[in-house]
Image (cartoon, helix red, strand yellow):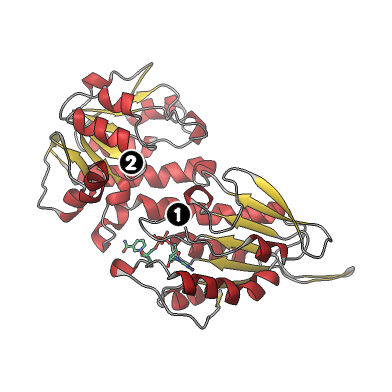
Amino acid sequence: MKVGIPRERRDGERRVAATPDTVKQLTGMGLEVLVEAAAGERSGHPDRDYMQAGAAVVPALDASALDVLLHVRPLDPHAAAALRRGTLTVGLASPSSELPAVEALAGAGVTSFALELVPRISRAQSMDALSSQALVAGYRCVLEAAIRLPRFFPLYMTAAGTVPPARVLVLGAGVAGLQAIGTAKRLGARVFANDIRPASADEVASMGGTFIRLDLETAEAAGGYARQLSSDAGTRQRQLLAPHVAESDVLITTAAVPGRPAPLLVTRGMVQGMRAGSVVVDLAAESGGNVEGVVPGEDTDVPTADGTGYVTLVGLKDPASAMAFDASRLYAKNVANLLALMVKDGALDLDFGDEVVAGACLTHDGEVRHRPTAELLG
Ligand code: NAD
């Protein structure tokens, strides 16, 4: 079976769906791997390394000759339609926001697997690309804040005086938030965090952060995810968070509720209440933003209420792609591990009785199998 690895074409995307390391894993499964020239160039994987690992590097992939296509970003409808019936794809698919592509995949009879749909159960942890990429994003957002902050993160006691450590507040303590807490802590900051899931208090403490308890209902839904707060509770949360935001040098927001736009946790007024020079990094910028006025991919200077300067509001975009080497290393492993569930002796062996295979399947045999996406398509 021929497995194709394309060069990603979306603007700003630097990751790749297979690394030389996973090419060895794929060939070990009895697969023939074809890598489009320069596919790994922007993540630090030259063509030569793919060839040494056992792949053939080709100037262009012939979509109609592939049995399997591994990708990072959702395929565009044109690329999906070019695949032959029965081709299997594995990658991120953003089903709810890429409906024309889902329709094209179903229309072409492609068996597509969306990494966003991999069930979050212990057995599937090695295939969980949402977690691996959130880990990268959580780390990266702290570095982005540290670079912009005109202060140190750690405490310094020097002959020229003592520099106090920065105070960092992380809102949303899922995978990305916990990594942000750990990274800020390793840089020497004093770190505080809040989440609406009760279990997160212990997780925050285990990463070295101090959990901020708010007099607020907790909001946990099935599967350990958050549920959306009522409008009143959201207003109250913002009121209760305001003094904590005001005394932070760095605010990092990572809050998300599955299937919903990002919750608004911080108003413009709260940002304006921070000290001049403070930095706010909104990791949810691309899904609506946790911070009012955030612009994805841009820094915005927000004047402080006291007129002494500005707060830098950072709308982080593609943070995992900015760390393309390690992000690809983890992503490619997730992809190869999921594919390994579906290949036996070099041939496809799809078992829809397996909850991971069934759960991650987006389209098969001309149908949209993921019910919420099928409902969106009407
Ligand atoms: P996520 O990206 O969906 O959301 C990020 C965080 O935002 C969550 O912790 C959520 O509680 C929080 N949040 C939502 N609304 C908020 C609000 N108004 N204020 C403050 N915080 C708010 O989360 P995630 O990283 O995908 O993790 C979600 C859950 O899934 C966690 O319980 C995590 O432990 C679990 N998980 C399980 C597995 C596994 O078993 N394989 C893998 C990854 C994550």
Q: Residue, x 12% and y 35% (percent of image)?
A: 365
Within the displayed image, which quadrant is ligand 1 positioned in? bottom left
321 or 366: nearer the viewer: 366
Name the residue furthest top.
59
* Residue at image mark 1: 134
The type of residue carrying mark 2 is: Ala
199 or 41: nearer the viewer: 199
Tell how many labels: 2
Ligand 1 has an atom within 8 Å of the beta carbon of the residue at disc 1:
yes
Question: Horizontal placement of 17 versus 215: left or right?
Answer: left
Pair 1/2: label in front: 2
Question: Horizontal placement of 69 versus 38: left or right?
Answer: left
* Residue at image mark 2: 93
Above or below, 228 against 344 in this view is below
Q: Residues within 10 Å of mark 1 (few under 14, many from 20)?
A: many
Task: State which quarter of the image contains the N terminus.
Answer: top left
Q: Earlier in the sequence, mark 1 or mark 2?
A: 2
